[in-house]
Image: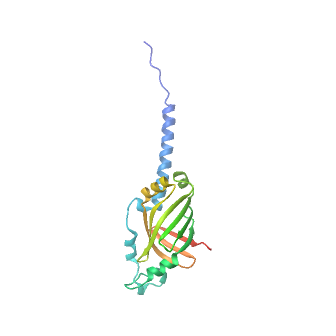
Amino acid sequence: MSKPTKQSKRPVQRHFGVIICLSLAIFWAWTSYVDHHPAVAEKQPAALAIQSLPPRSDNPSPEIALPIPGDNRDEELRQKAIGTWEDDYHGKRTMDLRADGTATMIVEPEGIGAALFAKKLTFDIEWKIEQGVMILKTLGGTPAKKIALVSKIYGDQAEEIIIELTDDRLLVEHDESTDFDWRRVSD
């Protein structure tokens, strides 16, 4: 009877190393997204955060003043928000807010976002402002499968507190740790 030969552990070790590297890369990508989108880990409506703002009479900045009954502040904010905006959050984003309540956002992610999703995503959006909160709901977009994946991971609606809205700047609180600072695009 022949003696069994001892098999090398190298192929197993090599595969184990590849699995560990891939696992670490996926973990890093996921935690990076969760860090910037805590709503993925714990959904909490942004509308609740608006209650913590000081009352209008104590608020030194009219840019973040809460509306009072009969106030047309939301309509003023909506009119001022109409137009095209850009920011550089994890790549280039351009958002075109139209007067009819529709919008288009073009996202050109950088790094891992481009690899996971696409080099360019176009979101079709419905938007409104209620009690100083901009509500953006994704209706679809292209590439459709990638938009569906993004919506599944992050949700299809964002509620962002308007911190400042001027002729040139739209600053919103996306969540407790992330603000989006949009610049108006000149026509």
Position of residue 146 measured from the top left corner of the image (x, y, whole percent): 49, 54
Number of numbered markers: 0
- Examine the rendered structure and indicate whether residue 142 appears above or below residue 167: above
Q: Residue furthest front?
A: 100
Q: Residue furthest top?
A: 1
Q: Is residue 142 visible?
A: yes
Position of residue 47 measured from the top left corner of the image (x, y, whole percent): 39, 72
Quarter of the figure with the N terminus:
top left
- Examine the rendered structure and indicate whether residue 120 appears above or below residue 186: above
Quarter of the figure with the C terminus:
bottom right
At 48% from the left and 84% from the top, the residue drawn is 62
Q: Residue furthest right?
A: 187
At 42% from the left and 56% from the top, the residue drawn is 152
Position of residue 124 measured from the top left corner of the image (x, y, whole percent): 49, 63
Q: Closer to the camera, 179 or 86? A: 86
Q: Is residue 61 visible?
A: no
Q: Closer to the camera, 157 or 14? A: 157
Colouring scheme applied when the structure was drawn: rainbow
In the picture, residue 128 is in which quadrant?
Answer: bottom left
At 56% from the left and 70% from the top, the residue drawn is 85
Position of residue 92 measured from the top left corner of the image (x, y, whole percent): 58, 63
